[in-house]
Image (cartoon, coloured by chain):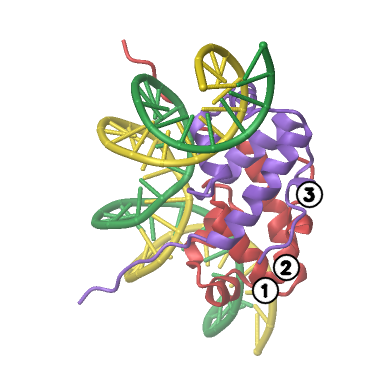
Chain colours: A red, B purple, C green, D yellow
Amino acid sequence: MKKRRVLIFDEKGLKAFAKHLKTIRQKKGFTQEELAYQSGLSLSQIARIETFRINPTLSTIFTIARTLKVPLYELFHFDLP
Amino acid sequence: MKKRRVLIFDEKGLKAFAKHLKTIRQKKGFTQEELAYQSGLSLSQIARIETFRINPTLSTIFTIARTLKVPLYELFHFDLP
DNA sequence: TAATATTATAGCACATGTGCTATATTAAAA
DNA sequence: TTTTAATATAGCACATGTGCTATAATATTA
């Protein structure tokens, strides 16, 4: 009987992050499409992040932060459940 | 001729994050092993992150932050190159 | 309303993150 | 030094992130 490997998918943390990101993106006046285009990321990826259906990598988030011109400490300034 | 898909690997950003994380871990008095054990992550994963050989996911970082009891905005309080 | 813009879903292929295990390298202590 | 603790590296299997393309659903505006 083999032990099943389980990867982390932090639903609550990702959801909190998603909401915060969406708020900031809108405050900065970006549509998902504009953010995608200017960052070089795909639109589907932006949407997947904001609907917390995936667990994005740091590089992806760094790229978004640069495009939105928001410092990381602000992008991560929300309460982790 | 098919266009080659290239994923992002933000070497400089990941390196800056890695250094900052290592500093905080040590300041909190954790060895990699302790951090791995208490967080439930694998030791190899902790090492790979600190040597910026991988591009970790948000869930992994959230788990580390909780274990170290460090707020996200502090874990991400460094300058993104 | 209808037309348009924006956001959300879906499926495929490929790249890679992660756990696991083992070993090697480096640092610290005796 | 030698021993021991701490980090780093390696390879495999499996899960999943990402780009791409297309379509659906929802919100906004005319």
Residue farthest along the left direction in this orientation: B1
On the rendered image, what quadrant is the N terminus of chain B found in?
Answer: bottom left
Q: Residue at x 53, y 76 (%)?
A: A37
Please give the label number shown on residue A30: 1
**Left or right: A42 with respect to A38?**
left
Quadrant where the C terminus of chain B sits is bottom right
**Callouts 3 and 2 close, C-beta under 8 Å:** no
Distance in Å between CA atoms under marks 1 and 3: 23 Å
The amino acid beneath tag 2 is Gln
Q: Tell me: residue B13, above or below residue B66.
A: below
Q: Position of residue A25 (x, y in %)?
A: 70, 66
Please check whether the numbered discs 3 and 2 fall on a single chain.
no
**In front: D16, or A63?**
A63
Q: Secondary structure at mark 2?
A: helix
Q: Is residue A51 left or right of residue B2?
A: right
> What kind of residue is marked 1?
Phe
Nearer to me, A45 or A74: A74
Q: Identify the residue at image location x=53%, y=60%.
A: B11
Tag of residue B73: 3
The image position of residue D11, as x and y in percent, is 27, 36
Residue highlighted by disc 2: A26
Q: Within 10 Å of the Cα at label 3, are there few (<14), some (14-19), or many (20+) other Cα atoms? A: some
Q: What's under tag 3, amino acid-wise? A: Tyr
- Left or right of residue A37, residue B62 in this image: right
Q: Quadrant of residue D15?
A: top left
- The percent position of residue A46, horizontal first and vertical second, equals 55, 61
Q: Residue B28: x percent and y percent? A: 78, 32
Q: Does label 3 lie on the same chain as label 1?
A: no
Q: Quarter-wise, where is residue A13 in the image?
A: top right
CB-based contact (under 8 Å), mark 1 and mark 2: yes
